[in-house]
Structures are given as structure tokens and as C-alpha cells.
Amino acid sequence: MTELRAAIEAFLFVAGFPLSLEKLVDLTEADKTDVKEAIVGLMNDYSRPHSGIRLLEIAGGYQFRSDPTLAPRLRRLQKERVQRLSAAGLETLAIIAYRQPVTRPEIEYLRGVDSGGVMKTLLERNLIRILGKKDVPGRPLLYGTSRYFLELFGLKDLNDLPTLKEFAALEPELAEALPLEPSDR
């Protein structure tokens, strides 16, 4: 079992993206139960205090990530400037994340402005993807978040997005400024 854990640890370390349980089973040619047990053991090893690395379940797979509390120190390592999203980009991304699948006209209705340029940027950055076409006249494209979106924001799946109650608990004035219907997330 020690050799299996070492192999899984190496695969996860080398991969630049989350590896699913199924992929790890294929790579190690081991039993799924043994692989899962090894992953749980590694997660426990890397969750100890004063460890700068965590093994997290993200975007349907497992990936090593740095401890978020070390972010200020790790920023020193970055040589190039972090590309940030504009307020319009974040707003559009939030609409897509919470309402997907959603069409561009629906996004523009909610935002009250044209969203073509912002959506192009989100597509180029691989944060959103085209899911298909809506079965209505004109057949507009349907948009949703990408797997990279989950990776970037450290989410296991879309259910990990904060709810309206969680937003309200953080900033009550924000919840009042942006009233949402109860059926919204």
C-alpha cells in the first residue's frame, strides 16, 4: 500500500490539473477501494498543522494546492501580474454560475447592458463554455461554467458556491442592495 500511496502522490504532484479517482485507478492499475483509501491517507497527511500543501478534492478530482493562509507570501513568487477580472466580468460570471444554463440575452436582461465583450473574455480565459443551443426561436447559445472555473475557485462542484444566506451573513448591505428571489441560489 505504501508504494501505491507514493505513486498516487507522484501523479498528483506532476499533474497540472485535478485527477479523478477513475483516472488514478487507471494510472496505478490498482483497485478503486485501495486508491480511495490511499487518497484519504494522503489527505490526512497533508492536512496536518504547519503544512504548506493541502490535497483537496476539486472539480471532480484531486489536486495539491497551497495553504490559502500562505497566499500573501506566495505572491512574492509571482513575476507576472495576475490577470484580474473586471467588475463586469465578475458580475457576468456570477450570473452564469448561478443560473446556468443561461443565454446571452438572459444575461444581458439581468445586467441591463450588452455583455458580448465580457463573455468573449470569459470564453477566452476558459472560465465559461458553450453548452449547446436553447430550443426556442433563434436557437441562442447556452452558457455554463467550465471545469477550469471550478479549479480556479477551488470548488468541488457548483453546490460549493455560496448561497444567498451565506452572502447575507457576510455583508448584510450587499444582500439588501441585490435582492434575489428565494428560488435563486
Image (spheres, helix red, strand yellow):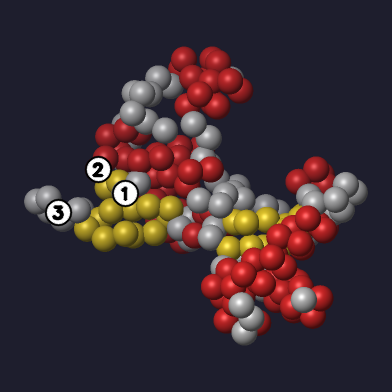
Rendered location of residue 81, percent (x, y): 70, 54
Q: Which of marks 2 and 3 is nearer the N terminus?
A: 2
Q: Residue 105 carries which label?
A: 2
Instruction: Work out which quarter of the rendered image holds the C terminus and state it.
Output: top left
Distance from the alpha carbon under mark 2 to that under mark 3: 14 Å
Distance from the alpha carbon under mark 2 to that under mark 1: 12 Å
Amino acid type, label 2 = Pro
- Left or right, 45 with respect to 84, comes to right
Tell whether label 1 touches label 3 (CB within 8 Å).
no
Foreground label between 2 and 1: 1
Disc 2 element: helix
Instruction: Work out which quarter of the rendered image holds the N terminus and state it.
Output: bottom right
> Residue drawn at (85%, 50%), measured in percent from left and top?
48
Amino acid type, label 3 = Asp
Rendered location of residue 155, percent (x, y): 57, 49
Disc 1 element: loop
Whether residue 126 is visible, yes or no, is yes
> Residue drawn at (76%, 63%), measured in percent from left and top?
42
Foreground label between 2 and 3: 3
Vertical side of 29 occupied by 114: above or below: above
- Left or right, 118 with respect to 40, comes to left
> Residue drawn at (31%, 49%), measured in percent from left and top?
101
> Residue drawn at (59%, 73%), measured in percent from left and top?
32
Depth check: give the residue in front, 48 or 14: 48
| Circle 3 crowding by C-alpha within 10 Å: few under 14, some 14–19, many from 20 | few
Q: Mark 1 points at which residue?
A: 101
